Amino acid sequence: MNYLIAGTGGVGGCIAAFLALAGKDVTCIARGEHLAAIREHGLRLHSDLKGEHTLRIQACTAEEYTGKADVIFVCVKGYSVDSIISLVQRASKPETVVIPILNVYGTGPRIQRLAPGVTVLDGCIYIVGFVSGKGEITQMGKIFRLVYGAHRDTTVSRETLEAVQQDLQESGIKAEISDDINRDTFVKWSFISAMAVTGAYYDVPMGEVQKPGPVRDTFIGLSRESAALGRKLGIEPKEDLVAYNLKIIDSLDPHSTASMQKDLARGHESEVQGLLFDMIAAAEQHGIDIPTYRMVAQKFKNLPH
């Protein structure tokens, strides 16, 4: 199968690099100086799992891509989803599957509404990956887990799901076909929201969240509040959501930070809408008390979102 990676940032770049290292057919969508560097020097990967590599990989802008893909991984930020819809439509054939890998809950159904006629699944990822330079991706730690699946009203063959899983696993990615992707994307949203918001609020790496004290207490408070929203929405996680979030945070590299935190520190556009204010809006809509979220939101209320 051939893979199109829409968005070659930390997540998309790591997926592309791992697939390419395993000899899979991959094309990356990128732009600007990042794209120019990939074209000139290759995609440079610094990886705790795979080591140091420079990969000659096909790369172009969304407008330049004229092919058809078997699998499209959508790895842009939540605020850029609308900008890649025309690419998704152009690059899809009847059997193409689109797998969004975003931090924001509800992305799969959103893309499906925007691109009717295309088979859109949903997915989430657990990884610390980021752009560390032009044409350069860094993957930290031992976790690279990708979960994907179809929503209940989406038809896709088990054979297709398993073919993607096999390619990902051969590439060194822990790939899981979800039996309830609505649950799994909510669980990821709960975690990444608490992680990103706590890190940005205190401006600290995850090592500070791993220590007992007010930073960790804030992370726990945010996790409890999103867990309450999940219960209201009928989400049934496999284990207690607060305990799960703590288990994941404690397994991260202590120096790691969320991409939202990095973007805010640089003054860049960030996912503060999807990871903070969308969570608050959903909780308020369902009558959930969210004192921790309201507290941290005060710091970010004047940011554009």
Image (cartoon, helix red, strand yellow):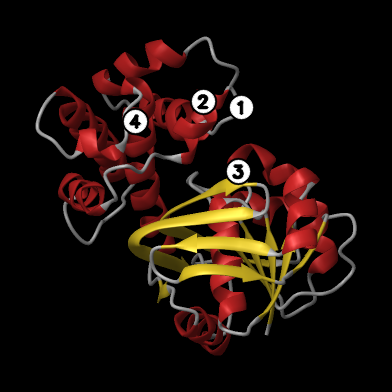
How far, Cα to Cα, is label 1 from label 2?
6 Å
Contact? badges 3 and 4 (CB < 8 Å): no
Q: Which residue is mark 3?
A: 77
For image coordinates 60% across by 59% down, the residue present is 13
For image coordinates 18% across by 52% down, the residue present is 247
Is residue 168 shown above or below 255?
A: below
The amino acid type found where label 1 is placed reads His
Element class at badge 2: helix
Residue 268 is tagged as 1
The numbered mark, 2 or 4, whose residue comes first in the sequence reads 4
How far, Cα to Cα, is label 3 from label 2?
14 Å
Q: Nearer the viewer, residue 36 or 124?
A: 36
Say which quarter of the image contains residue 189: top left
Q: Which residue is mark 2?
A: 264
The numbered mark, 1 or 4, whose residue comes first in the sequence reads 4
Residue 199 is tagged as 4
The amino acid type found where label 3 is placed reads Lys
Q: Percent position (x, y) of residue 60?
A: 82, 60
Element class at badge 3: loop
Q: Nearer the viewer, residue 299 or 171?
A: 171
How far, Cα to Cα, is label 1 from label 4?
16 Å
How far, Cα to Cα, is label 1 from label 3?
12 Å
Is residue 235 toward the left or the right of residue 71 in the image? left
Contact? badges 1 and 2 (CB < 8 Å): yes
